[in-house]
Amino acid sequence: MNFSKEEYKARLKKVQKSMQDKGIELLISHDTANMNYLTGYDAWSFYYAQAVVVHVNAEEPLCWVRKQDSGGAYIKTYLKDKNILVYDEKYIHTWPLHPYDNLVDIIKEKKWDKLTIGLEMDSHYFTAYCYEKIKQGLPNAKLKDSERLVNWARVIKSDAEIILMKSAALISQKGMLTAIDVINPGVRQCDAVGEIQKSLFYGTPEFGGEYSSIATLLPTGKGTSASHLTATQDKFVEGEATIVELSGVYQRYHCPMARTVLLGKPDQIKIDTMNKTNEALQAGIDVAKPGKTADDVAQAFWKILDKYGIEKTSRTGYSIGIGYPPDWGEHTLNISKGDMTILEPNVTFHMIAVMQFGDWGVEASEAIRITDRGCELFCDFSKDLYIK
């Protein structure tokens, strides 16, 4: 376990308080990161049905997993064995039989079938089929959207979580140093990413890395005007820029970072745009303090863009922490105009400034922690355009 039993108990109490506030008596959490947060469970088993079930008065959650994965639950979670529930292999890909048939049976056996049940309606891997099985199997229950209840409980990190994120940040820095070193004219993108991934997994002598919840993103040339492009077999070209977005990962905690590399002679337009981007990013960072809102940070950021006449319609940040594919965001606060979430100490977010102009773009980002008096950056790494 990465955390003490006391910390897991505190997390459970926080979630149960939110359940009470929302009138939820039983919570079914399918979100992989939420499962990890509440129990410590960690395995690449999220491609099939699994969940943490929380009763509003329970002393421990229930971890419900496939029989083949039950060994991982016994090893990874802090739970008593009786609170690890397994379903048989007969439910695997044998439609119309489905694992949620088993979960329905468990809820009925425990006389919970008339409770108000919270479901993560927009969670990755909670499919329409899962919902239909619950709806049809528990006609006397009141089903409602839990509205990312557990995700919001995760927004303020414990000091123990911050330590893990700082370790992830050191790995991110190693990965970015490798990226800047290996991106050269004539090198295949896939070869560069191979070296970057190696660096991210090797980590540091103290902290080995893990797989990231998002692939290393590597748009290059015209691709820098797009988002979320991954490496191809094409070679890097002199005169073109490449955006690198990656994250070191330690004990499932992420600290993403993005930087831009330019191969060849300095391009003044790109240099100037990178400087303007970083000025906007820094303006947001400067107002990120306890008591401020996500909107305050966004307003400061866009004030600089407006000054330079740069248009950006996408959000410029989001909460981060535990991550599993396909996303390292927590799906809670956004650094965008109108998000009035109050920033509190140990709120952590990725503030990402990507500027796109039709057939080119630049990008930089920082993973940020709100402190008692202001904020701090997890990574210590220049945001300037890297010219090679």
Image: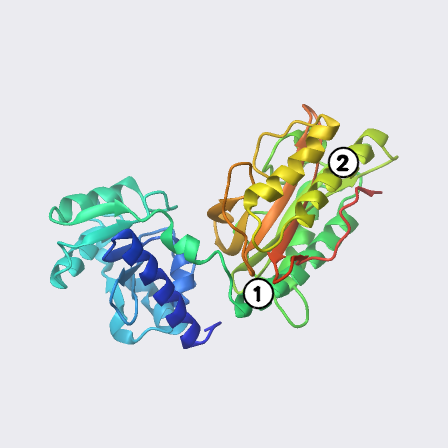
Check whether the beta carbons of the residues at disc 1 and disc 2 lie within 8 A of each other.
no
Report, in whole angstroms, how far the alpha carbon at label 1 lies from the one at label 2.
30 Å
Front one among 148 and 33: 148
* Coloration mode: rainbow
Q: For residue 77, say whether it is visible.
A: no
Q: Residues within 10 Å of mark 1 (few under 14, many from 20)?
A: some
Considering the image in quadrants, where does the N terminus appear?
A: bottom left
313, above or below 132, in the image? above
Q: Secondary structure at mark 1?
A: helix
- Callout 1 amino acid: Ile
Q: Is residue 257 left or right of residue 76?
A: right
Q: Which residue is mark 1?
A: 162
Considering the image in quadrants, where does the C terminus appear?
A: top right
Residue drawn at point x = 28 percent, y = 72 percent: 59
- Name the quadrant containing residue 16: bottom left
Residue 106, horizontal then vertical, whole percent = 17, 60
- Name the quadrant containing residue 43: bottom left
Q: Which residue is mark 2?
A: 276
Q: Is residue 306 left or right of residue 238?
A: left
